[in-house]
Image (cartoon, rainbow, N blue to C red):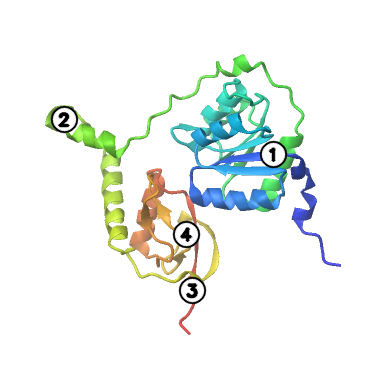
Amino acid sequence: MAPKSILNNTSFAADFKILLVEPDKTNRALLSRIIEDLKPARFMAVKSIVEARQAMSDRVDQFDCVILALKNPPASGFHYLQEIRSGQIPRTKHDTTVVLVSPPLNRTMVKYAQSLDLDGFIALPVTVTAMNNTLSGALKRDRELNPAEDYGLVKLPTPVPKKTSQDESSKASKGPNARIVWTEKDKEKAELLRTLKENAGNGQSNSSSVAEDKIDNVRTFWLKDLLPGMVLAEEITGEEEELLIASGTLLHDSLIEKIKALSELGVCRSFLKAGTPLPDS
């Protein structure tokens, strides 16, 4: 008899309806595959808090669990968690199970999580086992929440509206007296994105390209572990999901440094899928 896989022991999910809110399309696809393998009663993945509000307000049946990305423009996962806990979303119970997807929590984030009674935390990159254990524990957790109005009093950082190209055009039209102050980080980000967008638009990837079926040993690497000669196995997109670096790009020192800079500037994750090129036959 064949050994049972771990997924055969995840029947707990069959009783629950799960909503994933993840703006990053790569993360959304990865997390969706893992959650779908757990066979929940219903599963839905959306890319924005706006879509999540609509889904939670309009559906005939309610979601039992919401999985939130920490980075969820125009606010954060904590802001949406507060909306749920304070009863601001129609037809949604304030004690809905909520799990946060984020990098390792720091002291401030732990404080917010405790104040808003976060039910669980998933660190990326995530494994099937970790997802199974976290969701199982969160959904089976026996807890008693505070009244909804208490959660509305929790102080969170004010969301910073995302700048659009229209905003920048409007500022530029005001001329030299607009008193726009660009930090060195702003300038570095603008120049880096401009270079990468130009290269992508011209069909260049700063290096040679490898066909998808010629990439071997694909796995997830932290950026610090990327090495010259590896091949990027997923595309890197900008804040407007425009292509910056194509999948199949052969990495070299200069390009790896640019990818690390993207991460430090908040454009790119701190981990990516990469592999090695198959030898020419």
Q: Amino acid at mark 4?
A: Glu
| Crowding at mark 1 (Cα within 10 Å: few <14, some 14-19, many 20+) | some
Disc sitting over residue 174 in the figure: 2
- The residue shown at (30%, 40%) is 185
Q: Nearer the viewer, mark 2 or mark 3?
A: 2
Tell me where residue 134 sits by quadrant: top right
Q: Secondary structure at mark 3?
A: helix
> Could you tell me if the residues under marks 4 and 1 are in contact, i.e. CB atoms within 8 Å?
no
- How far separated are the C-alphas under marks 1 and 3? 39 Å
Q: Is residue 10 left or right of residue 102?
A: right
Judging from the image, what secondary structure is the residue with disc 4 in? loop
Q: Which residue is mark 3?
A: 214
Give yes or no for contact between labels 1 and 3 (Cβ–Cβ under 8 Å): no
- Please tell me which of labels 4 and 1 falls first in the chain: 1
Amino acid on which disc 3 is placed: Lys
Dot 2 alpha-carbon crowd within 10 angstroms: few under 14, some 14 to 19, many 20 or more: few
- Verify CB contact (< 8 Å) between mark 2 and mark 3: no
| Residue 208 higher or lower than 78, as above or below | below
Quick one: label 4 or label 2, which is nearer the N terminus?
Answer: 2
Extreme-left residue of the structure: 176
Residue type highlighted by circle 2: Lys
Locate residue 247 relative to residue 9 in the image: left or right: left
Question: Does residue 103 appear in this view?
Answer: no
Q: Earlier in the sequence, mark 1 or mark 3?
A: 1
Question: Which quadrant does the N terminus fall into?
Answer: bottom right
**Residue lying furthest bottom:** 281
* Residue placed most toward the observer, 105 or 33: 33
Residue at image coords 77%, 29%: 142
Residue identifier under label 1: 17
Give the number of the disc on residue 234: 4
The quarter holding residue 57 reads top right
The percent coordinates of residue 100 (x first, y second) are: 59, 37
